[in-house]
């Protein structure tokens, strides 16, 4: 039974550096909401039993209590602002390009959504997109483990959404715009890249794969790819 | 017809069938028309949901009863009557709409997209708004503020028939070539703005037109509500003596009035893009896809509160009456609703955290969104406070109201996850949001609505609904509802995307690598139980209209003005316009002989009634 109520258990395996920060926020909110829910339900059910209709007992005439109103307004406000403050650094780190990590070792790739595939374009040996040695693969994203990956995300037709459940990444891909996304995979493996925004009749089956390689395997893949 | 009308007027001062039941100007009849219309659309919207739930649980299997048999698919041999039907239809699949959209009784992806698009569109615009705002707004506002009718009765009648026109246009979309709108109820451009992206032509156009027509109906209604509440309150009915449900409808009318023009212009731009070759939303022509999202959600978020605020108002009435206690913190309840309404204008960006909107805006939208927890908490705690030291009667409306409170708590709390933008990254556009919206709008608004139908039925139709059927319907709905929507939370956390045709397309796993398609099957079974339970409700409503126990004038011993009017309520509502001396929730006042004091009872006047006898609690 508890398995069904323990939401954090259901998160997909985390395989990115910043995923833990996001998951910690999830767990924090989970406990806040769980405690509030249990408390409210306990009071509700308690009142429902205790104050049910009984012959000869009249309800008490109570119009309200200013102290209580101020208390629960203040407490909720404090929790809300506290949560917002805790969330800000996580959000900025994930989404604001000026705060992204950057080093010469980083990997660059362009991802473009189109009905109903992900085009992954690699810059090739010169490290620049839009040159002759670019390589485009359908639905296969190859990255080395423990390296920052910068994704230039765009779309050719409708809005798609680049969803990496195991990296805790989701970003809509917009036609006519390029959006910067980054992640840093910490575990070798093959992960799914579904499209999370309705993009037409093939939306359900729009699925790419993220292949996280060891450094050696990645070097080998690069060698094979640009042979 | 004319002769008949004259005759009636001469002899009985009655109206003709047409002016009494069809183009009625009486707010009560218009309210009942909205009620029947909303219930019919409810069946349509719910039926669409059952169709796509089948596909989600058993992907690409033919539908039961109307689909072909598995043997027919495997071997081409006719086994059942349904097989024969599809064999015949298969021949002219160019023309046959059913065959084209649902080949051999299997829901294909194009039709699937139309199904969930139309399920949401119908439920939001043609069920919850007509029922909560149309039916109860019309029926209750004049009665509860103590006046004879709406300020503009003709406008009121037009509002109803305009919304019927909207529904007819919307339904017509199912029959046009290319199928119905399939870009989601949110209609994100450019998927919705360029026909080639979905293959849907007239379906999406009709969707836009129907929503504009529907909005015009809402505008007419809201102008009427606002004018009536401001100008036509009975003597002594000050703003702070208004019942909370009237406050909620008044606030909702203002929200509708302000929000609708925004979506109407967005829909018009979308139509231009589709039909006149403009590119407001298409990046290829220099347009901006996010413009649609901003316009839609600037309307859409107030719209969400339009769906829940009347539920809050209805539940507040019933909780106070059946606890035999004043609403705890009446004024803070009013201010909480007003603050929810204000906040609803500054939170729309939370739908767009992952949309590519400037990420620096998210902090602001996250804070305003989470601030909605404050008035929501105030309301919840005040409902609890109303139960405190009450004398609670477990009538059918009270059961629904308590369900409303507990389901609204779950819906409110699950909202905090998505309001938090980093957490939203993972659960955005998954089943988590599906669970959340249904806990608020179904668990919240619709349970309050069921309770309200039961509670006001005696005043509407002069008869009681059956309490036993009511309780069976309540418990089945309550359990099945939670069986459908609670598991969607965990599906969402696991990463189950919304709006997908086949959940098996991705390899979703639960804790320990468990398969989770079984959860989808469980949800669908519960959904069928939930759907079947509504048959009980419909039977109860229509049977009770004619055969129910005849209702007395004030069966619940309630204070508000509608219960002081005769049953059935005559044209013009009151013999004399009532004078109001009290707030609406003077229950169990110390020293009074009865546990209720009608709003019309002056101080020192003898009381009108006795406390509810124990035997009456079963209703």
Image (cartoon, rainbow, N blue to C red):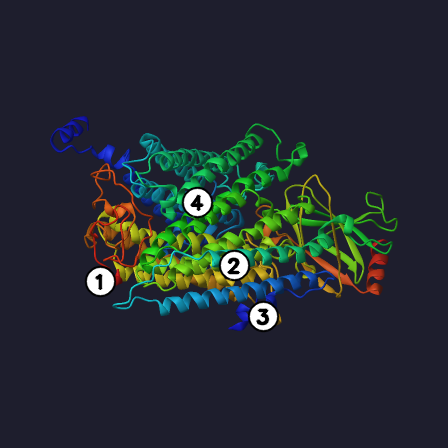
Give the spatial CA distance, label 4 vs label 1. Answer: 42 Å
Q: Position of residue B342 (x, y in %)?
A: 52, 43
User: Residue lying farthest left?
Assistant: B11
Residue at the location (80% across, 62% down)? A146
Left or right of B512, for residue A176 = right
Residue to which mark 3 is pinned: B514
- Please report the residue visible at 25 percent of the width from the left and 57 percent of the height from the top: B592
Q: Nearer the viewer, mark 3 or mark 1?
A: 1
- Residue at numbered disc 2: A71
Give the mark, 3 or 1, whose residue is nearer the N terminus: 3
- Which residue is under mark 1? B613
Chain under numbered label 1: B
Picture quadrant of residue A221: bottom right
Tell me where residue B393 sits by quadrant. bottom left
- Cα separation, mark 2 vs mark 3, equals 44 Å
Q: Which mark is residue A165?
A: none
Quadrant of the frame with the C terminus of chain B = bottom left
Q: Are marks 2 and 1 in contact (CB under 8 Å)?
A: no
Indicate which disc residue B122 carries.
Answer: 4
Q: Is residue B290 above or below residue B67?
A: above
In the rendered image, residue B489, in percent from the top left (x then y), is placed at 53, 61
Q: Is residue B588 left or right of residue A69?
A: left
Which chain does the numbered disc 4 sit on?
A: B
Q: Are marks 2 and 3 in contact (CB under 8 Å)?
A: no
Do the residues at pointers 4 and 3 share their chain?
yes
């Amino acid at each position: 039974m508890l398995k069904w109520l323990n939401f954090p258990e259901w998160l997909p395996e985390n395989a990115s550096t910043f995923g833990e920060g996001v998951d910690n926020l999830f767990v924090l909110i989970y406990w806040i909401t769980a405690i509030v829910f249990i408390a409210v339900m306990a009071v509700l059910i308690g009142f429902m039993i205790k104050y049910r209709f009984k012959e000869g007992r009249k309800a008490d005439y109570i119009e309200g209590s200013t102290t209580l109103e101020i208390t629960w307004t203040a407490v909720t406000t404090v929790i809300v602002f506290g949560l917002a403050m805790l969330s800000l650094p996580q959000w900025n780190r994930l989404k604001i390009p000026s705060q992204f990590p950057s080093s010469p070792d980083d990997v660059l790739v362009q991802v473009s959504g189109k009905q109903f595939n992900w085009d992954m374009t690699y810059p090739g040996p010169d490290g620049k997109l839009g040159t002759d040695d670019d390589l485009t693969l359908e639905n296969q994203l190859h990255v080395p483990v423990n390296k920052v990956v910068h994704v230039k995300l765009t779309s050719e037709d409708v809005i798609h959404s680049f969803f990496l459940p195991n990296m805790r990444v989701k970003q809509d891909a917009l036609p006519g715009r390029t959006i910067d996304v980054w992640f840093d995979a910490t575990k070798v493996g093959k992960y799914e890249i579904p499209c999370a925004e309705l993009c037409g009749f093939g939306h359900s089956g729009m699925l790419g794969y993220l292949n996280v390689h060891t450094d050696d395997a990645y070097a080998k893949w690069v060698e094979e790819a640009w042979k | 017809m004319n002769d008949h009308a004259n005759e009636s007027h001469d002899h009985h001062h009655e109206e003709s069938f047409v002016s009494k039941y069809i183009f009625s100007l009486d707010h009560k009849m218009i309210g009942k028309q909205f009620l029947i219309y909303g219930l019919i659309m409810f069946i349509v919207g719910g039926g669409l949901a059952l169709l796509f739930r089948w596909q989600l649980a058993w992907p690409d299997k033919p539908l039961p009863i109307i689909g072909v048999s598995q043997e027919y698919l495997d071997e081409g041999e006719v086994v059942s009557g349904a097989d024969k039907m599809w064999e015949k239809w298969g021949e002219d699949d160019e023309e046959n709409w059913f065959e084209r959209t649902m080949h051999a009784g299997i829901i294909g992806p194009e039709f699937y997209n139309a199904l969930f698009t139309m399920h949401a569109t119908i439920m939001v615009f043609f069920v919850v708004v007509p029922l909560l705002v149309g039916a109860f707004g019309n029926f209750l506002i004049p009665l509860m503020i103590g006046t004879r009718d709406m300020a503009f009765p003709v406008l009121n009648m037009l509002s109803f028939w305009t919304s019927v026109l909207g529904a007819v246009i919307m339904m017509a979309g199912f029959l046009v070539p290319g199928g119905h709108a399939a870009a989601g109820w949110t209609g994100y451009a450019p998927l919705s703005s360029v026909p080639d992206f979905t293959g849907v032509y007239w379906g999406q156009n009709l969707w836009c037109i129907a929503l504009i027509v529907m909005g015009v109906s809402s505008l007419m209604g809201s102008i009427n509500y606002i004018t009536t509440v401001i100008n036509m309150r009975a003597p002594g009915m000050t703003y702070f003596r208004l019942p909370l449900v009237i406050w909620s409808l008044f606030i909702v009318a203002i929200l509708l009035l302000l929000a609708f023009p925004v979506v109407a212009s967005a829909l018009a731009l979308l139509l231009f893009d589709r039909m006149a070759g403009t590119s407001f939303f298409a990046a290829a022509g220099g347009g901006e896809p996010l413009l649609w999202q901003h316009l839609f959600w600037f309307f859409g978020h107030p719209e969400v509160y339009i769906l829940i605020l009347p539920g809050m108002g209805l539940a507040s009435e019933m909780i106070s009456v059946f606890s035999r206690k004043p609403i705890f913190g009446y004024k803070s309840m009013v201010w909480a609703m007003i603050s929810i309404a204000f906040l609803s204008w500054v939170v729309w960006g939370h739908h767009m955290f992952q949309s590519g909107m400037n990420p620096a805006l998210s902090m602001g939208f996250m804070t305003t969104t989470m601030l909605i927890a404050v008035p929501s908490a105030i309301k919840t705690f005040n409902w609890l406070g109303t139960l405190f030291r009450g004398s609670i009667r477990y009538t059918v409306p009270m059961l629904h109201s308590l369900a409303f409170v507990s389901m609204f708590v779950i819906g409110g709390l699950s909202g905090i996850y998505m309001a938090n933008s980093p957490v939203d990254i993972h659960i955005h556009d998954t089943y988590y949001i599906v669970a959340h919206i249904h806990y608020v709008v179904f668990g919240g608004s619709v349970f309050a609505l069921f309770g309200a139908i039961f509670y006001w039925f005696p005043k509407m139709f002069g008869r009681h609904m059956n309490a036993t059927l009511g309780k069976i319907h309540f418990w089945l709905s309550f359990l099945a509802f939670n069986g459908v929507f609670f598991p969607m939370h965990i599906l969402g956390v696991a990463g189950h995307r919304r709006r997908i045709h086949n959940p098996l397309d991705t390899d979703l796993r639960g804790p320990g690598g468990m398969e989770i398609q079984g959860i989808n099957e469980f949800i669908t079974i519960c959904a069928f139980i939930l759907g079947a339970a509504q048959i009980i409700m419909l039977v109860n409503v229509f049977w009770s209209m004619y055969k129910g126990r005849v209702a007395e004038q004030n069966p619940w011993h309630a204070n508000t003005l509608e219960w002081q009017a005769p049953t059935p309520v005559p044209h013009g509502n009151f013999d004399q316009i009532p004078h109001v001396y009290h707030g609406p929730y003077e229950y169990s006042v110390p020293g009074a002989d009865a546990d209720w004091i009608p709003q019309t009872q002056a101080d020192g006047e003898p009381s009108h009634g006795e406390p509810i006898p124990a035997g009456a609690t079963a209703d």
